Amino acid sequence: MAFVIAAPELVSAAAENVASIGTSLGAANAAVAASTTSVLSAGADDVSQAFAALLSSHGAQYQALSAQAAQFHQGLMQLLNSAGGAYAGAEAANVSPLQTLESNVVGALNTPTQAIFGRPLIGDGANGTATSPNGGAGGFLYGNGGNGYSFTSGGTQSGGTGGSAGLIGNGGNGGNGFLGGAGGAAGSGGWLAGSGGNGGAGGSVTGVGEVGGAGGAGGSAPLLGWGGNGGAGGDSTQGTGGRGGAGGAGGALAAIGGAGGAGGTGATAGGDGGVGGEGSGRLFGLGGAGGAGGTGTTSGGVGGTGGAGGVAGVLVGAGVGGFGGMGGAGTTGGAGDVGGQGVTLTGLGVGGIGGVGGFGTATGGDGGAGGQGAALWGAGFGGDGAVGGNSFVGAGGNGGDGGNGGGLFNIGRGGDGGNGGNAGATGGNGGNIGVVANGTFTQTLFGDGGNGGNGGNGGTGGTPGTGGSGGILIGADGTNGS
């Protein structure tokens, strides 16, 4: 019996099922009681009386067996109920000693490292408090970092920083700022595996001309894991919104960068979006998206730059740049920022799409340029330029240029230029096939150029973008915009 495992809740469920069986048997016996208790003779002759006596004998035997079955059922149900209670009692009696044993073992392991290094060997770091706002570091072997403290009263306060993980674990989140204080930076993930924490949000403000707090940066992932997202910038009801925090970098092997935080809303100007984190994986890298610019009454915030794709693939891999952040709305729309570069040594490099220009009541924001898809050996595809922002009464934003295709020794394609915003804005130029190194553009042998963007509608027609150049040996030039 040493290897028998019992689950008390399953034993209790079995007892309930047996009880329902007994109810069904009782109902069946009641239904046939009249026909099995006594059987009347069909006539006064000997044959009828003998046949009635035989059926009555069978009925009596059935009633006797039914009584025995009911007695057996009652005993089985009592046995199951008592067994379930006994198992539950034994389990409850053993829980406390096991918990005590676990606590004692972990405590014995953690005491030396806590005394020498100020952090445990195994276990999560402590969360920040009002008196000690920064989160504690996670255990050396395993454990998540503690979260930074978020202030909710007092004067201007920055959020506490998140604690970093040890070998395996996730970084702690940064705390939120208060009254214009910056959001706390997040802790980094484990050295072997674990994602970075998210940055804290900047504190909001209400005073004239005050700037919202900046968002905290997302934590990085050293080897395997995702970068944390940047915190959002704080809002300002009578001033400028805070800048969004930068996204954390992804791990060195296979990674996704964290997204940049959104800029805060402002009465005069929106905050700029945070930069997307780099996806620096050697096998695969995806840059984080730039944060969106905040909305402002006078001018919208500028969208954040998309994170660069990783140097993906020592032998083969893929790098994809993050999208540029969208510009914020305002009297003058914020510009969308540049898409991240999709860098690879061998494999596939795809540039990120530029951020869309913000809507402006007077002037639309310019669309961001697409990122370069720079693959040295392999295929490089430039990111598309973004559309310029529209405007009610003034000029629309210019469309972003398409990114260069890259692919020095192989195929590629330049990104398409973005369309200009309404009210006569210029369309973006299509991307070329080639790579830019040290400020010098080198055209590649194969691939198509990107198409130019269309000029904006309304007012004086906008200038269409020019199509990009194709490869030297093989490849078509992109078409000009209309």
Image (cartoon, rainbow, N blue to C red):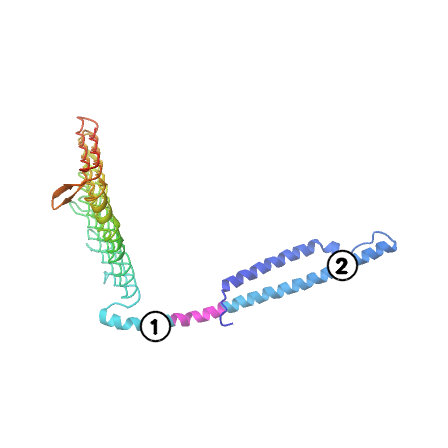
Give amino acid for label 1.
Answer: Val
Residue 24 percent coordinates (x, y): 63, 56
Neighbor class of circle 2 (other Cα within 10 Å; few <14, some 14-19, many 20+) is some
Magenta portion: prevailing SS class: helix
Could you say which quadrant of the image residue 476 lies in?
top left
Question: Which residues make up the magenta segment?
Answer: 88-100
Looking at the image, which is closer to me, 278 or 380? Answer: 380
Element under disc 2: helix
Q: Earlier in the sequence, mark 2 or mark 1?
A: 2
Residue 321 percent coordinates (x, y): 23, 46
Look at mark 2 in the image and give the residue it sits on: 58
| Residue under the point 30% across and 72% down | 109
Q: From this viewpoint, which residue is outermost toward the left?
A: 439
Q: Is residue 334 magenta?
A: no
Give amino acid for label 2.
Answer: His
Element under disc 1: helix
Residue 139, above or below 426: below
Label 2 to label 1: alpha-carbon separation: 69 Å
